[in-house]
Amino acid sequence: MRDALLDFDTVHSDMAFESQALKLFAYQYENNSTYRSYCDLINVHDSDVERVTDIPFLPIQFFKTHNLNSFTSDPAIIFRSSKTTGQTASQHPVHDLDLYIKSFEKGFAHFYGNIEDYVLLALLPSYLEREDSSLVFMVDHLIKKTKRTDSGFYLNDWEALRTKLNALESKGQKTILLGVSFALLDGAENFQWDLKNTLLMETGGMKGMRKEWVRSALHQKLRDSYQVNQIHSEYGMTELLSQAYSKAEGIFETPPWMRVFARSVEDPFELLHNNKTGALNIIDLANVDSCAFIATQDLGKVHSDKRFEVLGRFDHAEIRGCNLMVL
């Protein structure tokens, strides 16, 4: 049955998504003991699930507390999330790295076209020392995929980065400058830029390095300092093998094999209608060998066209009814 789930990238319609999601649920209910136990605990059995909206979403903190292996052998790699002192890292067992590579390569191409058309420069200072970071793995692979010697990682050598960007701008080279928010803010506060051919993409918050900003204020600061018309964003996490992207105004789109729903914060089993603010649930059909149905701790709203916004986070104490097995 697993082999039939590996072609998630062939999903291009709502009907195909529903069919694939139901097959994946049946597979993970049968093979993922943690997910099966959670479903049993909330009294949902495989015979109860007839539509995508019937599928239970596993609270994301299970990736910190339980083994979410849906496969019979040890994983090829375990990706781990970043954490601050006193926190427990999420762990995502991945058996087939080709699934991850296929997902992020095709996801990038879906939104931005051929990676070889770009030079990719990455500002990921808080991640580079971590060999188990899924973000570093993805960006490193994409950098190599550009087949351009100008592509690469930058840490704190701002002068070298400015020199490189100026040279690329003078040639009219399409470039992506991708970085965590605090690193991009460091550049915004200490230098003046004029980027005409460079796409600026932020990939997450302050990682404990600075005070969090409201997204609209952050993007305005970055637009003004880097002299770009729009700020792009990447939405991903250790627990997922797929990413959503925003090309403007913090409105995200998913690849066809990924879907986002909003749930009530008061009742974690109630899915909300369009444009209502709630916590975000995610289905990632690329998560074949772990759990594809995740209730995140992100707050947001989902629009009628399936695009979504991320408005913030809520803490562990506010999750009502979701943490029975975690406790």
Image (cartoon, rainbow, N blue to C red):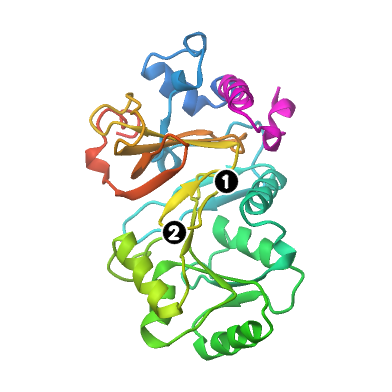
Disc ID at residue 82: 2
Position above or below: 235 against 123: above
- Mark 2 or mark 1: whose residue is earlier in sequence: 2
Q: Residue at x 61, y 86 (%)?
A: 164
Q: Identify the magenta region.
A: 1-26
Position above or below: 153 against 12: below
**Quadrant in which residue 249 is drawn:** bottom left
Q: For residue 5: magenta?
A: yes
Q: Are marks 2 and 1 in contact (CB under 8 Å)?
A: no
Image spot of residue 39 (x, y percent): 43, 20
Q: Is residue 161 rendered to the left or right of residue 185? A: right
Residue occupied by mark 1: 242
Image spot of residue 161 (x, y percent): 56, 84
Image spot of residue 36 (x, y percent): 49, 22
Mark 1: give few (<14), some (14-19) or many (20+) Cα within 10 Å.
many
Q: For residue 246: magenta?
A: no
Q: Residue at x 69, y 38 (%)?
A: 9
Give the amino acid at mark 2.
Ser
- Pick the residue in front: 141 or 133: 141
Q: Nearer the viewer, mark 2 or mark 1?
A: 1
- Pick the residue in front: 283 or 163: 163
- Pick the residue in front: 58 or 54: 54
**Quadrant in which residue 250 is drawn:** bottom left
Main SS category, magenta section? helix
Give the amino acid at mark 1.
Ser
Quadrant location of the C terminus? Answer: top left
Q: Is residue 144 rendered to the left or right of residue 50? A: right
Q: Secondary structure at mark 2?
A: loop
Position above or below: 304 against 23: below
